[in-house]
Amino acid sequence: MNIRATCPDCGDVVLPREDMQVRICAEDRSGSYCFRCPSCGVSVSKPAEDRIVQLLVAGGVELKIWHVPAELFETVSGPAINHDDLLDFHLQLQDESWMEKILA
């Protein structure tokens, strides 16, 4: 069975159901589907309402349940990293003993 989907670059495309995947977030039950465009090769991901998720899964599209990374629930403290911090880190990595200096 083939599925019709829309690529943002190519427009409507037809692909086998094996080339599409439905994803549901375990935490908030939001759904999406993704595929690689058979014409241009771009990866496409689009949100999907429950009805679309059910239709795609009933049509044989693979279903994956994913979890929000635990890091997103961590409390963040301290200042945000800025451009100067990034440049300093880059310069530290130029030194071959960078790992020893970081661990010290």
Image: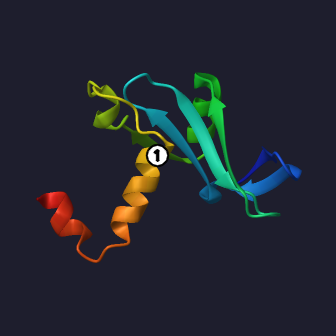
Image quarter of residue 38: bottom right
Q: Nearer the viewer, residue 104 or 54?
A: 104
Query: Which residue is identified by label 1?
Result: 84
| Quarter the N terminus occupies | bottom right
Scheme of image coloration = rainbow
| Position of residue 20 measured from the top left corner of the image (x, y, whole percent) | 62, 52
Point 42% across, 61% down: residue: 90
Q: Nearer the viewer, residue 94 or 80?
A: 94
- Can residue 58 be seen from the camera position used here? no
Q: Eyeballing the image, is 83 above or below 55?
A: below
Point 20% across, 59% down: residue: 102
| Position of residue 89 measured from the top left corner of the image (x, y, whole percent) | 37, 56
Residue situated furthest left in the rendering: 104
- Can residue 5 be seen from the camera position used here? yes
Disc 1 residue crowd, few under 14, some 14–19, many 20+, Cα 10 Å: few
Image quarter of residue 101: bottom left
Residue situated furthest right in the rendering: 11
